Image (tube, rainbow, N blue to C red):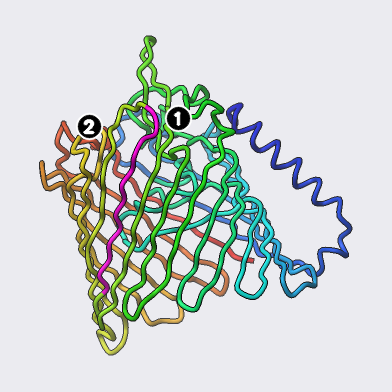
Amino acid sequence: MITLHRRRWCGRLIAGILGALTVSSASWGEVDRQFQLSLSGQFFPNIKSSSADVRQQFLTGLEAEFTSDFDSDHLIGTFLPYGRIASSGGEMNHADIRELNLLYTANDWEGVAGISRVFWGVTESGHLVDIINQTDRLEGFDGEDKLGQPMVRASRLFDQDVLDLYVLPGFRERAFLPSDQPLALPFPIEEDKGLYGARNGQQHVDLAARFSGYRGLVDYGLSWFSGTSRDPEFIAQSNGTFRPRYPLINQWGLDVQLTLDSWLWKLEAIHRAFETEALTSDFNASIGGAEYTIYELADSLFDLGLLAEWHFDSRDDRTTVPLQNDLFIGMRASFNDTQSSEFLAGVFSDLDDSSSSFRLEASRRVLDDARITLEAQTFLDVDPDNAIYYLQDSDFIVLSLQLFF
């Protein structure tokens, strides 16, 4: 089942796709096709529930990518739909168009029009500056999965720098896990009754810009965003539910990476100002740290990276900000084998109350066109006043097999 506002949005996208498909197939030129079939199992061993559908769930996802250059030297079209079916059904089934756009290149200019995804950031344990796309909370706990965003982007390419300008029409609300699902927020949400700081709600046109490049050993990005916040606040209702509210914001961001031999020094920092009255005051936040890599260990079997990053948030409110004074310590192993094996493990530790969380990610290519991945997280000694206390019994394991064809 898909909620009403998502059905309307998908309906408009489907109408646009059908219109595009009326063009004769010859005008598309040769179309490259790639598919990824994902088979996953999610397991929650500590969930206090008698329902097997809650303690374990199986998911099947299909992602396709179609690209064409239209027999042109300047134009590339991309269509990337995604859909997933869950064994529990309901709102856990969902679909999205990740990308549907045209890229035009000419000399030192680029332009993109349509639905696309944009990533900003350099740090490992979080991405403060990454704000263009809405987070797909139905797809993953770590927030790395993003929904497609309608946009027009114009880029000017310089020798060592790029200036990107964005016009972002239409806003996509965040979809939340149903209340009966593990990892769901600990209060009922009326997500189909979102509130907005903008008078025209979802129709508000957002603007963004980013200037990025490199100077010697330093890679940097300076960004600005003005529009509807992708992160909602929650307004309590008289019936005991909460409505998400998306205020208007201005956000200035900085991301920097310094490369010194085996060291990578990283920083992401933002200042967010609210244009309208909001429950949260203006604030500053940052993630800073380093990664040191030891190469060719065990007779060149693998490279080992050691990571440390500190999260700071000036709001200093543990009931609403999970990572406001937290330290991430981790290690990454990249194996020099034909299977491209990778391993990442790390611990988040709250420096105020000693709450902690351990996370593990691993992947390895199997056969010729498949990859197996493992994701797991456990929550340890979580303080009752910590923002993640509701997750204390939500340890999980996700095992997936991706088939590429």
Q: Give the range drawn in magenta.
A: 264-276
Per the rendering, the mark at residue 319 is 2
Mark 1: secondary structure: loop
**Marks 2 and 1: in contact by CB < 8 Å?**
no
Q: Residue at horizontal 30%, vertical 39%?
A: 394
Q: Which amino acid does label 2 sit on?
A: Thr
Residue 1 found in image quarter: top right
Q: Is residue 24 above or below residue 172?
A: below
Per the rendering, the mark at residue 178 is 1
Per the rendering, the mark at residue 335 is none
Does 272 lie within the magenta span?
A: yes
Bin the neighbour count of mark 1 within 10 Å (Cα to Cα): few under 14, some 14-19, many 20 and up. Answer: some
Q: What residue type is labelled 1?
A: Pro
Q: Residue at horizontal 49%, vertical 50%?
A: 208
Mark 2: secondary structure: loop
Q: Which image quarter is the C terminus in?
A: bottom right
What x and y, as percent, mark residue 356?
Answer: 18, 47
